Amino acid sequence: MRHSDFVESIVPFHNWNQKISALASGDRKRPSSLSALLPSSPGALVVKRYSKQTNNSSLTLLQHDLERRLKFNWIVSRKPAARTVAVVGGRPMYDEIQGVCGSRGFFEAAQALGMSLVVFDEPNHWLKKEKYSHLCREFIPMDMSNITELPRRMADALKDKHVDGIVTFTDSFVIATAEAAEILGLPTEPLSSMQKAHYKHEMRRLVNKTNIQAMHLTSVDQLEDGKMQKSFQSLKYPLIVKPSHGQFSRGVKKVGDDAAMRQAILFLEVTDNLPCPGDKSAATSDENFVETVQISNSGLPANELSIIRNSLHDSLLQLGFRSGVFHVEARMQNSCMQYQDLRGDNILDLAPVSKSREQETDVFLIEINARSPGTAGTWATLYTYGVDMGALQLLHAVGDAERFACLSQPFSSTLGRDVDVDIGGGGGAQYWNAQCMIPVHRDRVFVPPGFVDMVLAEIPHVSAHVSRAELYAEARTFVSPGDSAWVAYFLLFSKVDRRHLLEMYHLVAQVSRRILDEQMEDRQNMMLSV
């Protein structure tokens, strides 16, 4: 019921493993008392106060809101078993004072699902500390850098732990996790499919379409190989140069000619979707493809959304996947929409193209990540659609198909019996959502403690539309683009329209950048005065 207009708070009555009894037959039509209802109720809603004149209509709207949110099979056929899941990679702690960590989402999901966690990470990881011992059943310190040996060492460490599944939320451990699952005989998608998806050129070779240019280089020396020159000459610029495997759009560059392509490969910037800096028509290899803002629900028309769904589903099947949670990136080609600044205020949004496209609409697959989205993306989907991708990945790891199917259902787009809801653009979204990423925009950006509060204090009218905001880099440290892609993220929501959402995003982005620059100037002045 998060962000319901009618609910103040929720009081749960039962835990995940408690059976809720049906109402006594005599109480089903007219309960004898309130206390007779409580044993058969999962919880209670504390409703917001309304005037007597609006109370009845508000209760009716609350009933519709409940029906919209609970329009899925939330009663399972049998009591779920308590499960233990191994998690490979515990994610960073960004601000220990405020308790901001990248793993909070899957810890909360595991607790709600009745799962205990065994976590692998480096010996100096923050989860090793006694004060965090309540978060997982066990923390197993391990050198995570030797990826070749990691699957066997994890399997050896788990062989007497009686775990029911193993999962990772981190790209760099996807292959090792699948391999460990196969060694232990635990549920997993095929290792071969994971490898094909992880290595981007192999993935593209299998699902490639004839109108897409693609070339794979294994070393810089190939740039001077005479045998490759004919292939280079056939390339049409501009091109996108990217690592064959990686994360966060690090090392992704746009190049306009042969010389720039060589420079982009020789100088590899290890940095990891309104347009990114690298999307501009005049972009050079100095500008990257780090995401700045992603909007839900999509502004594309229904027929193009259907093309995307079918194309990406077919690609997953071609790679050998049959089930799971995937974070897939793609681009729409020859869409009837394009990003435009219609009001001349530098705020871009999708709008119809002025001329119809002559070529057929198509989808270009960029990459498949065999995991749930990142921290901000997972929270955004949960708040907007009611679907917890982290929870689904945990359920898939233990083969719990029943709860996986139940909890994959978004909110309904129908309000009451007959009224379709357009808030959020449909598709089950309860509002429009923006995942606003604050990039590391230059070298040595200082991450001030309380950065999120500093930003929102300057734009208080926006703070009421922030569902979540956290650091993505460690507080009190200096970061550069090679260290971290982003400083923080803000999740914004609007029940007005996409334009309202984008206006708030631009304010957040502008204020964030100014505060980061001012903090740097203040620190430089302090150093000079000393």
Image (cartoon, grey):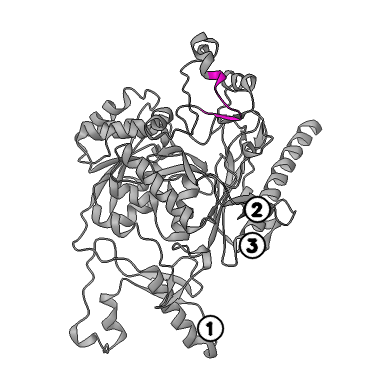
Q: Tell whether 108 sits left or right of 498.
A: left
Quadrant position of the N terminus in the picture: bottom left
Residue 236 forms part of the magenta stretch? yes
The residue at the point 60 percent across, 45 percent down is 292
Residue 505 forms part of the magenta stretch? no
Residue matched to label 2: 354
State which quadrant residue 17 falls in: bottom left
Disc 1: CA contacts within 10 A as few (<14), some (14-19) or many (>=20): few
Quadrant position of the C terminus in the picture: top right
Residue 7 in percent (x, y) is at 47, 73
Residue matched to label 3: 500
The disc at residue 353 is none
Residue matched to label 1: 50
Upstream in sequence: badge 2 or badge 3: 2
Upstream in sequence: badge 3 or badge 1: 1
The residue at the point 33 percent across, 54 percent down is 111
Disc 3: CA contacts within 10 A as few (<14), some (14-19) or many (>=20): few
Q: Tell whether 450 sits left or right of 106.
A: right
Residue 61 in percent (x, y) is at 46, 79
For residue 406, above or below residue 274: below
Disc 2: CA contacts within 10 A as few (<14), some (14-19) or many (>=20): few
Residues rendered magenta in the picture: 232-242
Give the CA separation, mark 1 to mark 2. Answer: 48 Å
Residue placed most toward the observer, 506 or 480: 506
The amino acid at mark 2 is Ser
Residue 399 in percent (x, y) is at 23, 48
**SS at badge 2:** loop
Q: Nearer the viewer, mark 3 or mark 1?
A: 3
Residue 365 in percent (x, y) is at 45, 39
Give the CA separation, mark 3 to mark 1. Answer: 27 Å
